[in-house]
Amino acid sequence: MKYRFIAALSALITLTGCASDGKVNDKNYLRAAAVDGNRVTMSFFSDENVTVTAGSLSEAKTSAELRTGKEIFTGYTELIVIDSESCADVLTYILSEWKVSPECIVAESDISGEKLLNERTPEELEGAVRAAQKHSLTGKCDIVTVLGSLLKNGTAEVPEISGDGFSGKVTLKNN
């Protein structure tokens, strides 16, 4: 009886293999994303940046996962840099499908998202927006506030950021 138990236990251990069960190191954690039309640049907490061209945000995420070889987790995203075209649709998708944090900052940039995220870290950009808020240079710009304003009023004021950090405010329009 003892030998059968040992044999069964050995077989069980052998059959479980070394497959991943969704461990922390098997995922890329999205810190910031910049959406420029059909180009999406993703910056991860691992300090890796990936730029993909895709027909939709779903395709962009899948393409980035295929390029990095890891599943992308979006729940800790701190910053979304968006262009002014179709911003309400994009933000609705990001909030409902990517399930970013409700405190995720929304900003606009006068340069491409890829260039911006290669010049400055997401931490620096988020810090610049937080400092501007502290000094009353810009208002609340979390994704829920911005999306709510776009859907209710047709416009929303967001910070503009560049390679130099915070550079002012812009008004997004719901097209």
Image (spheres, grey):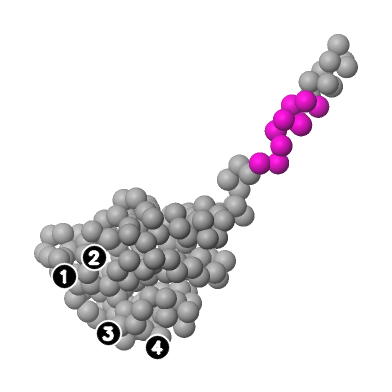
What amino acid type is highlighted by mark number 1?
Lys
Location of residue 133 by image quarter? bottom left
How far apart, in angstroms, are the residues tagged by discs 1 and 2?
A: 8 Å
- Residue 49 is left or right of residue 13, and the answer is left
How far apart, in angstroms, are the residues tagged by discs 4 and 3?
A: 11 Å
169 and 18: which one is in front? 18
Residue where numbered disc 3 is placed: 168
Q: Which mark is residue 87?
A: 2
Identify the residue at horizontal 51%, vertical 56% (top origin).
66
What amino acid type is highlighted by mark number 2?
Cys
172 and 148: which one is in front? 172
Is the magenta region chiefly helix, strand or loop?
helix
Q: Are marks 1 and 2 in contact (CB under 8 Å)?
A: yes
Q: Which residues are magenta?
A: 10-19
Q: Which mark is residue 72?
A: none
Location of residue 175 by image quarter? bottom left
Residue where numbered disc 4 is placed: 164
